Structure formats: structure tokens, C-alpha cells
Image: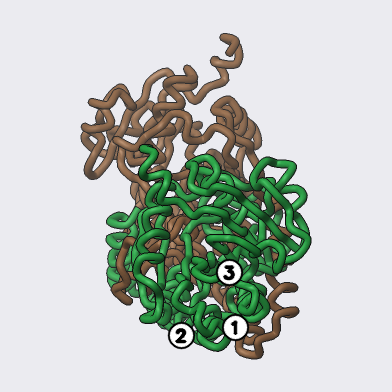
Chain colours: A green, B brown
Amino acid sequence: MAASSRAAGLGRVAILGTGLIGGSLAAALKQGGLASHLVGFSAGDAGQAMSLGLIDEVADSVEQAVAGCDTVVLAAPVSVNCGLIARLAPHLPPGVLLTDVSSVKMPVVAAGLRHLGPALGGFVPCHPIAGSERSGPQAADPALFRGRIVILSPLPQSDERKTARLEAVWAHLGARVIRLAPEEHDRVYGLVSHWPHAIAFALAGAVARDGVSRDLAGLGLMDLTRTAASSPELWADILIQNAEPVLAAAAQVERQIALVEAALRQRDRAALVNLFSEAAAWRKATG
Amino acid sequence: MAASSRAAGLGRVAILGTGLIGGSLAAALKQGGLASHLVGFSAGDAGQAMSLGLIDEVADSVEQAVAGCDTVVLAAPVSVNCGLIARLAPHLPPGVLLTDVSSVKMPVVAAGLRHLGPALGGFVPCHPIAGSERSGPQAADPALFRGRIVILSPLPQSDERKTARLEAVWAHLGARVIRLAPEEHDRVYGLVSHWPHAIAFALAGAVARDGVSRDLAGLGLMDLTRTAASSPELWADILIQNAEPVLAAAAQVERQIALVEAALRQRDRAALVNLFSEAAAWRKATG
């Protein structure tokens, strides 16, 4: 990477929340030379992030973390990020680029509109579509975002230069950036991520409750339930923060499940083959 | 492998159906020196299996394929295997070991009880828990069964020496053999495999029908829908052959989904965390 492209980094960066995503972003920014200094704060594990070399400094409070920063990244669970927006609004340095990595965008957008005042133009909501069933700073990986999609959901009020700067940084980290309005983001990810995670938890839960021997499960079930090993608290939070779009997605999926079940009750092989072929075509083209 | 253990192979083997499973089994038997000669028959692709070196000979008919064989493996779709049992019963050589690799056991057991007569003692129903979203002889892999589970579902009438011989052969191929009564097999696999496959198809179908851009899907959805790239015809056949246990499994999973949905409607975070924790504990322990 050329010095000129390194110069278009994020300057002094505060990472609030140094778990899997925040820790991975810190490590990636450091590796890419895209931050001049990385200050971390976390309710639990910033010390561990520091000892792992992910950040340069641990702050004693969020207010201390953001003091003098060029960029603030909210990388806590979505409900915590919303609270941080309200709490930090009076403490944000002028001209700061504020972004987040929350899986749900409307709650942070609403908190921004309500609390940020003149700092709203510096707010660029963001969601990297990357993760793992692992969590915590010990799972952090600077390559986590390489080849992944990152959604930017700027507001009409967002400063386009800041949006473009953040876009360039994510591109430097190997991500493909797509812009999506916050409402559309939440609708789409309710369907392609949030409710599917709930289904994985439900499926694993049904098998667990049945009491069937663990030995009997095949690789298909392991794929289907991989995300059920994710953090229960994190996913409860995401589902509740995006409840209405997720419930709409649940209805879409249930309609499709009902079609399969009806075809099966009628032993209608042609109908099953049609339903499955449509799904297989989508999956093969997407895979 | 010692010559003595090779000697406990399957002798002259007819493989009826030379797709992914039949082709992989043929390749594994050949590689392991566990068959003296491999004759294949398939409605479509035995010639391809031959040119790929999976089998030694292509038969012109199933009757010709089984003539003089020590072992007959039914490796066609389950409904075809049932038809083959009826058709082959008068043509099976005395003392033959007849087995199958069907994903559903009660239909082949019923066909065996109805048609096999004196050959029933040689019938050892079997289901290797291995597969892939790929299909056909070109996807065959002699290592497909290594580290996998193979279910044997012998009948009270099955010859224990033949069951033990088949068990030893699967163990030579690197599989772990578990015996399970046919009814229990179908109940368990309805829950841990058949209905989960239907859910994967339904989920991929719901996303396909929504029309959301393929670019936006994350790795979680790719895991959840991987099996939706499997053969629609194969899975329609499996679900219909195991319809009642699968519908019972569907009800079990739907109860669990309804619990998640109710907790979400009530924004009951504690209830969601409890449900997800139970699932995550199962998944992590099974992983």
C-alpha cells in the first residue's frame, strides 16, 4: 500500500467494545497502517485486547477513550451502542467520524437523530457482514473482513467525505462495500441473517430437547446449526432490536415451510421437487 | 491391511446405482481390497462409473448384475431400491449378502419382508451418514465414509454373521458403525436430517422468492442453506418415503420456532437467551 493511501486512514481511533468484531477491526487497522493510535474501552475485555496487541492503549472510560480522537467506532452489542451514542454526544471531538458495526441499523440511526445534534453529519452507520460462532478478543482476526461484504448506511445528513473515507478504509481491509438505506438493511438482514440464526437455534434446541444421541447427527445438521453455537445474548439482543423486520421475515420463511409441509402431507412429489429446485437454483448460483 | 482381513471382504459385488454413494462405496471397496470384482448397473451413469475406474464391469440389467454375486448393494434412490428388492428376489444367488444405503429404512424393510422369502436372512439394511450437496459418479470419493457414522439396521431375521461381516467392512473403510432398529432410525433421521434438509430448502426458497440481492448473504446463511444445493428429486423422494416421522419432526421443530417467535413478540430477552443457550450448549458439545 502506498504512503498516500495510508495517509487516508482514520487517525486516532477509539474502539468501544473490543470483542470479536472490534478486536478484529483494531488488528486490521493496525496491520494496514490505517490508524495512528488505537484506544480501546470495553466493559470487560479491553485489557485482554491490549495484552493481545490489538490496541495501543486502554481507556478508563468511554469519555476518556474518545477525547482527541479522529474516529470513534461503536463495537459493543447494538443496544449498548445506542446508549453510547446518547452518552458520548456531548463528548465527541468536533469533526469526528463516528461509526458503528451493529447488526441492526435503525436503532443506532434513531439514537443518532435523537442525540447527536451537530455531530450527526459525522455519523456513518456501518455493518460488516463478518463474524464467527466464536467471540471475544481472543477470537480476533485481522483477516476477518477480507473478501466480506461491509454495508454502509449513511443518512442524508452524513458528510459524504467521511462516508467515502470509511468506504476506502474498508476497501483497504479487503472488504467489498455496499451502500444500503438503514430500513432496507434491517429488512434484508432480518431475512438473510437474523431469522435464519433463530431457526438454527430452534433446530438445535429441538434436537437437544429430543435427547437423540449426539453421535447420530450428520454433517448436514452440523452446517445447519453451526451458527447456533454463537452467543445467545448477542443474538437475543439483535433479534429484539430488529424485532418487526425479523417477525416479517419469520412469516416469509413460515409460508415457505408450510408449502413444503403441505406438499409432503399430500405426498405430492412434483410439488416438492418444484419447491426444492427453486431453492437449489438460488443456492447454487449464490454459493 | 493384512491379507487375512482383506479376505473378510465382500467377494464379487454388484452395485446397483453408481451415483455419489454407490460410486464412492465401489471406489472405497476397490481401494481397500474388499471386493474381488465390482459389477455396476445404473439407469444412467454406470458407463461413466466404469470410465472413472470405480467399477470393473457394467451389467446390461440388474438381473445380470447380481448373477453369481456374493454381495448386492442397493444404492439407488430409496423408492427405486424398494422396487429392486421385489424385482431381484427371484434372481438373488443363494447365500447372498443383500444390503442398501437408503436414507430411509422402513420402506426397504417392508419390501424385504414382503418379497425376499428365504433370502431375508441375508438382508442387512444400512445407511451411511455421508453425502454431499454434489451428486453423480463424478463426485464419488473413496474417502467419503472415513470418520463418518454408518447405521446398520438388521432385522431379527438377519444372519448375524453377515451383519458382522458388513460391519467389519465399513470399519475397514474408516466408518463408525452404530446399530439402530429401523423404526428408530427413521424417527431419528427424520429429525436430525430429513426435516432439516426441508428447512434449508424452505429458507433458501424464501430468500430466492424475496428477490434480495445474492451479494448481501453472509456466511451464516451459506452454512444454513448448504444442503439446499442437494438434489431436489433425491430429497423429495426421501421426505415422501419417510413422511410420517418427518412430519412428526416438523412439529417438534415448529414448537421450538414458535417458542422463539413468542419470546420475540414479547421482547422477552431472558426467554430468548434461555432458548438459545440450550441450543448453543448442544451445538458446542456436538460440534
User: Which tag is nearer the camera, tag 2 or tag 1?
Assistant: 2
Which one is closest to the eye, mark 3 or mark 1? 3
- The residue wearing badge 3 is A93
Residue B114 lies, with reference to residue A147, above or below; the image says: below
Q: Which residue is mark 1?
A: B261
SS under mark 3: loop
C-alpha distance separating marks 2 and 1: 11 Å
**2 or 3: tag closer to the N-terminus:** 3
Front-lying residue, B242 or B274 = B274
Structural distance between the alpha carbons of marks 3 and 1: 42 Å
Residue B93 to residue A74: above or below: above
Give the percent coordinates (x, y) of residue B70. 45, 27
Circle 2 packing at 10 Å, graded few (<14), some (14-19), many (20+), is some
Q: Residue at x 40, y 51 (%)?
A: A8
Labelled pair 3, 1 in contact (Cβ < 8 Å): no
Looking at the image, which residue is at 64% across and 79% down?
A: A90
**Residue B117 higher or lower than B166, as above or below:** below
Identify the residue position indicated by label 2 in the image: A248
The quarter of the rendered structure image containing the N terminus of chain B is top right
Q: Disc 1 is attached to a residue of which chain?
A: B
Question: Element under label 1?
Answer: helix
Tag 2–tag 3 contact (CB < 8 Å): no
